[in-house]
Amino acid sequence: MAYSSGVGGLLSDYAQLRTLPALTVSLLFVCSAILFGAIPEVPINWIGVTISSGSALIVSLVIYVLAFASSETKSLEYYENWEMALISSGPGIMLAYQYIPLVQDQFAANSPTLSIIGFVFSLVSWGVMVR
């Protein structure tokens, strides 16, 4: 990659790094780990807040919206059917895990296998979305 000269060129080079997807995948990794129980609730003592699975879900859903908005396609018509199914499976599994008691019971009964699968699906769906 050749670097440009000048301020405009520097901003163009920086924009090519796609920092928003890199930041969102990092946050999604942590929030998914909290949601599916790999990391316990995280207290932030400086401001007196604890990041629970409920708040991790909200942050994860915001991350999906930001990632989709920053993706190069920005429209579902550019995805194939299997990709759309995979993209929707990440948030779908997260919402089902948080709000449907039957799903929560299944995750608890098959611990940690289903939790690991849910965690992986959340990251894979993000990866397919921002391709």
Image (cartoon, helix red, strand yellow):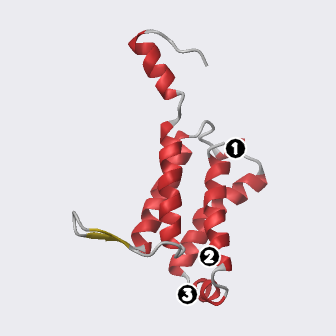
Residue type at mark 2 is Ser
What percent of the width, then of the height, locates residue 35? Answer: 50, 72
Task: Work out which residue is located at the far top of the displayed protein and give it.
Answer: 5
Image height of 108 relative to 10, above or below: below
- The Cα–Cα distance between marks 2 and 1, rounded to whole angstroms, is 31 Å
Quadrant assignment for the C terminus: top right
Disc number at residue 115? 2
Q: Is residue 96 left or right of residue 42?
A: right
Residue type at mark 1 is Glu
Quadrant assignment for the N terminus: top right
Q: Nearer the viewer, residue 93 or 46?
A: 46
Disc number at residue 77? 1
Asked if the residue at tag 1 contacts the one at tag 3, i.e. Cβ–Cβ closer than 8 Å, the answer is no
Residue type at mark 3 is Pro
Q: Residue at 53% x, 31% y: name it.
A: 17
Q: Nearer the viewer, mark 2 or mark 1?
A: 2
Q: Residue at 67% x, 71% y: name it.
A: 117
Image height of 29 relative to 119, above or below: above
Task: Tell me the residue that label 3 is attached to.
Answer: 101
Compare marks 2 and 1 and give the one earlier in the sequence.
Answer: 1
Q: Residues within 10 Å of mark 2 (few under 14, many from 20)?
A: many
Q: SS of the residue at dot 1?
A: helix
Q: Residue at 58% x, 64% y: name it.
A: 91
